[in-house]
Amino acid sequence: MTPISSSPVRRDTFRRTFITTVVVLSLLCAGFVALDIVTGPKLERVQVDTAQVVRQGDQQVRFFSSEQLGDASSARLSIVPDVDASVSVSGQVLAVQFARPLDYDTEYTVTVEGITNTADEQEATFTTSFQTDDPPIYLLDRDPGGDTIQRTTVGSTERTVVFTATGIEDFVLVGSVLAVTTVTDDGSSALQLVSLDDGKTEQLPLPVAGVVSQLAATPFGSTIGFALTSTDDPYAPEVNSVLYTLDLSGDRSFATVPSLTGEPLEVQGWAFVPGATTLVAQDLDSDVALFDLADPASVTPLGHFSDFDGLSTDGSAALVTNQLGPVRLDLADLSQVAITPSVVDAFGGDVTLLRDGKRTQVVAVTEGTTGVFESYIVRDDGTTAEKIYETVDQKGRIIGSTPSPNDQYLAIEVEPNAADSVTDGYPVNPRSTTITTVIVEIATGAVVRSLEGFAIDW
């Protein structure tokens, strides 16, 4: 058989086709490279925790680029709705960090223009939109047929019972667990944990038999704390309450907080500092100090005050009272700012410290023609005040209030009709049998929800 050989024409055709293909591919590659240079860095993915971003400040939305990014100093940032934020770059990641927690259930659009890579100055734009969470809130509703802890949200009308028991005194949320105290037949307290995942409960024997009060939890950790009295008459005025803490991620060992003398700290009042391992407490001598749970020997005296009434929502300041009245005490430099109502001729009541020196306050004002006192809650920046809530026809009584972690809402406990109010008789955290919680938007004063119950845990 005669071998078949390619003709010169066929060989030339193949050669030309091959060369043409190589040239075309080379031009396409060059085009893609040129296009890449022209368009700058590419956005590959975006990361944001839509739950945490409404609970804490300094949270980030992170843009992941296809290549190393250049300096962010010339980047142009816009956020809708507007919120203060900063831009930084680390390798292939551009981060936009919010100065404060964002609003609940709100769509945000974040755009960063003028982004460059490290090779050239060609600019690109990164943009993303995300919806923040409407996180769950919990509250206690007492009823002769059984007390319940219920879950809902600001924007929902549904309420889900997550735990039922007789004699619930107080509760706090710790991650996916509720720590609940109940009153026993002999008047002492019992402590148990309730899993929100499967409803299982765990009884926690107290260090000593007694009454638990001032139950609290670290906002972003796994530790609870409470004051515990151990006596046959725990409600006698001379009885002292020892502060205990319990890290639920550990071996269930209760610990006392050492005082300046090394003895277990006996407290009048106390609170965890948000986002830290520290707490602020006032001892029986009315001295207020900062205690570090990670370093029990570290105690920072803050001063001598007649009262300690809690911390600001960002944990930067304490609300204390000296001989002249309520004071905002900065925990960093111990500077003090007196709190006086900006409302003319008003008597100041309970105060809640917000970020940036702002506050809400219960005030009482004399009505000009009748001389009758009217009370309401104001939003106050230290110069001007604006009314954000008053009870219907001034018949109710404002018991207290708790701000949401992002300072967007205020949960206000109200006795709707003070003249007809009857106490539920509980030894710890007694309330009116008609207690109601009203949730108000702080910026506008709009009432967004009204709920039977109290002790909202955000």
Image (spheres, helix red, strand yellow):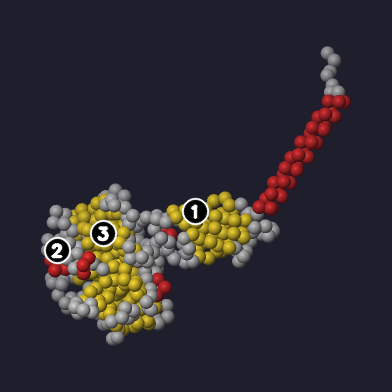
**Closest to the observer: 375 or 337?**
375
Q: Residues within 10 Å of mark 2 (few under 14, many from 20)?
A: some
Which residue is label 3 attached to? 450
Residue 190: give x, y in percent of width and height: 20, 61
**Real-space Cα distance between discs 2 and 1?**
48 Å
In the picture provided, is 450 more to the left or to the right than 99? left
Residue 163: give x, y in percent of width and height: 23, 53
Image position of 135 with respect to 335: above or below: above
Q: Residue furthest right?
A: 8
Mark closer to the chain start, 2 or 3:
2
Q: Quadrant of residue 371?
A: bottom left
Residue 324: give x, y in percent of width and height: 29, 86
Q: Amino acid at mark 1?
A: Ser
Q: Secondary structure at mark 1?
A: strand
Cβ atoms under marks 3 and 1 closer than 8 Å = no
Image position of 19 with respect to 288: above or below: above
Q: Residues within 10 Å of mark 1 (few under 14, many from 20)?
A: few
2 vs 1, front mark: 1
The answer to whether residue 292 is visible is: no
Q: Residue at 56%, 59% (x, y): give it.
A: 112
Which residue is label 1 attached to? 129
Which residue is label 2 attached to? 424
Q: Residues within 10 Å of mark 3 (few under 14, many from 20)?
A: some
In the picture provided, is 142 more to the left or to the right than 118? left
Q: Residue at 16%, 77% (x, y): give it.
A: 237
**Real-space Cα distance between discs 3 and 1?**
31 Å
Q: How many marks?
A: 3
Q: Secondary structure at mark 3?
A: strand
**Closest to the observer: 1 or 379?**
379
Mark closer to the chain start, 2 or 1:
1
